[in-house]
Image (cartoon, rainbow, N blue to C red):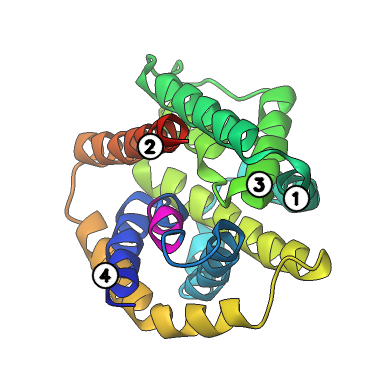
Amino acid sequence: MAIALAAALAAAFVRGLAGFGMAILLVPVLGLAVPPSEAVVVSNWLGVLIGLVGIRKILGTSEKSAYVIGGLAMLFTPLGVYLLAITDPAIARLGIALIALASFVLVLLPKRAEHHAPSALETGTTGITSGVLTGFAGMPGPPVVPYYLRRQISPQLARASMMTIFMATSVAGVASASLLGVATVREPVLAFILFPAVLLGNWLGNHAFGKVSDTAWRTFTGAVLGVSALAALWRLLQA
């Protein structure tokens, strides 16, 4: 429990600063103590709880694309939960690793032109993939982060948009796991135990966000995505 609380604090700090990354860092640690499916549901519960903190400010500063991506992600999260239930663990780890690595490579590519507007296909694919990954691995971030980070928009707009999407995917993850019988009463109990640490970490991350430059923020978010890719690859090699 002490390790879980420390992980929750650190993961929430990353979430407050980068706008994403809580599930990426928290799920592997929780997975050492509880079944992976339970760790994913706990992470989604925490995403719902922390998403309610300052939700009006986030919604008011998000890009319109966030609502399209978030809506599609919610629709396709049940598909991810179903795939998780029927997929061989080795194949699941391979898929997660490949997606995480591909997303990290995309972030490293040159940024889009200043006035680039993502196509409907790009936006739709991002939403669908994010939803499937939410249910499948509790990781909605890999397709969403490159979508915003490669564009020349302000960190405030990118961060608020990502947080809006991840609030939607957390709600969908909890609802899908409950409806499909994957969730139990244990997950919300553990989530409420961890929530004070998440609340503190998120506050510290929010405080730090206002003090870093655009370049430093983009570097940090890219590093977080890189860590997730390395973690997914490590889990694959250990299998």
Q: Earlier in the sequence, mark 4 or mark 2?
A: 4
Q: Earlier in the sequence, mark 2 or mark 1?
A: 1
The stretch of residues the image draws in magenta is: 25-30
- What is the spatial separation of the Cα atoms under label 4 and label 1, in whole angstroms? 29 Å
Looking at the rendering, which quadrant does residue 132 occupy?
Answer: top right
238 sits to left or right of 116: left
Question: How many C-alpha atoms fall within 10 Å of the one at disc 4: few (<14), some, or many (≥20)?
Answer: some
182 sits to left or right of 231: right
- Looking at the picture, tell me which residue is in the foreground, 176 or 239: 239
Residue 69 appears at what percent x and percent y? Answer: 67, 43
Q: Is residue 54 magenta?
A: no
Marks 3, 1: nearer the viewer: 1
Question: How many C-alpha atoms fall within 10 Å of the one at disc 2: few (<14), some, or many (≥20)?
Answer: many
Q: Earlier in the sequence, mark 3 or mark 2?
A: 3
Contact between labelled residues 1 and 3, with CB atoms less than 8 Å apart: no
Q: Give the amino acid at mark 2.
A: Leu
Looking at the rendering, which quadrant does residue 195 occupy?
Answer: bottom left
Q: Residue at x 27, y 62 (%)?
A: 10
Q: Give the amino acid at mark 4.
A: Ala
Contact between labelled residues 2 and 4, with CB atoms less than 8 Å apart: no
Q: Residue at x 56, y 61 (%)?
A: 59
Q: Which residue is mark 4?
A: 6
Question: How many C-alpha atoms fall within 10 Å of the one at disc 3: few (<14), some, or many (≥20)?
Answer: many
Q: Which residue is mark 3?
A: 136
- Looking at the picture, tell me which residue is in the foreground, 123 or 63: 123
Q: Which residue is mark 1?
A: 85
Task: Note whether residue 104 is visible.
Answer: yes
Contact between labelled residues 4 and 3, with CB atoms less than 8 Å apart: no
52 sits to left or right of 237: right
- What is the spatial separation of the Cα atoms under label 3 and label 1, in whole angstroms? 8 Å
Contact between labelled residues 1 and 4, with CB atoms less than 8 Å apart: no
Task: Note whether residue 64 is visible.
Answer: no
